[in-house]
Amino acid sequence: MGLLNVIRTLRLRHGLAIREIARRTGLSRNTIKKHLKAGTVEPQFATPERQSKLDPFADKLAGWLKTEGGKSRKQRRTMTQLHADLVALGFTGSYARVAAFARRWRADRQREQQTTGRGTFVPLHFDPGDAFQFDWSEDFAVLGGERTKLQMAHIKLSHSRAFLLRAYPLQTHEMLFDAHWHAFRVFGGVPARGIYDIEP
């Protein structure tokens, strides 16, 4: 559901104060007042795609970083030398851009090394009442004749695979807690632990 529609629903249908709407949405009271007064539609912001000066040299630099990573510390080229070598090939960008690329590249390789070969271990056997799993997804429904995006809370018992789905307009803390409360009420208790899918 578009944020502006949420603002209107909370104000006009549920009669919430602007202060409460600001608390729930994280928007300022002035922004909420402006949108309620103007009757605007959900703004669409297009992010222009800008090509970096480093893009044509990215594969070359990544290859160099990989090669340099296999050398001893004393034999490796410094970042200043790598920048100078790129300039010799026609690169006109700054040293800072090359250094930032190298940091991101090394962080990506480190994450790969931490996960490669180890795999992800998820136990396939759970005792009754041992654990539940929680995650969000998005879905659509027709509400009041309009196609509306909903945030779906999924709660599943790990042992029995019994589950509960609840739809919300947003993924706020209040809605997260509400989904848990309803699930534990329906399930008749609270499992010992929860398993959450947390995005980096």
Image: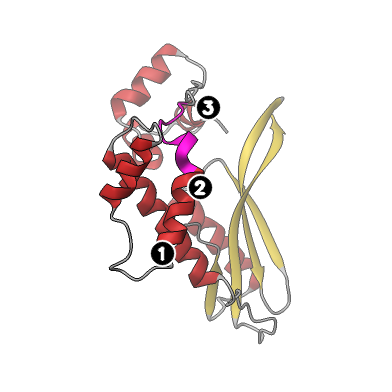
Q: Tell me which numbered mark, 2 or 1, is placed earlier along the sequence.
A: 1
Identified by mark 1, the residue type is Gly
Work out whether 197 lies above or below 190: above
Q: Which residues are magenta?
A: 50-58
Q: Position of residue 109 (x, y in %)?
A: 47, 61
Dot 3 amino acid type: Asn
- The answer to which of 120 and 35 lies nearer the viewer is 120
**Secondary element at tag 1:** helix
Counting from the top left corner in percent of width and height, residue 48 is at 47, 23
The answer for how far apart the CA atoms under marks 3 and 2 are is 15 Å
Residue 69 found in image quarter: bottom left
Q: Which residue is mark 3?
A: 5
Residue picked out by circle 1: 69
Q: Is residue 109 or residue 18 the one in the foreground?
A: 109
Select label 2 or label 1 by which is in front: 1
Examine the image and state in which quarter residue 135 appears.
bottom right
Q: Which residue has dot 2 on it?
A: 171
Q: Observer-nearest residue: 103 or 67?
A: 67
Tell whether 24 sits left or right of 149.
left
52 relative to 77, above or below? above
Q: Is residue 102 above or below residue 140?
A: below
Count neighbours of disc 1 (C-alpha within 10 A) and say few if under 14, some if 14 to 19, many if 20 or more.
some
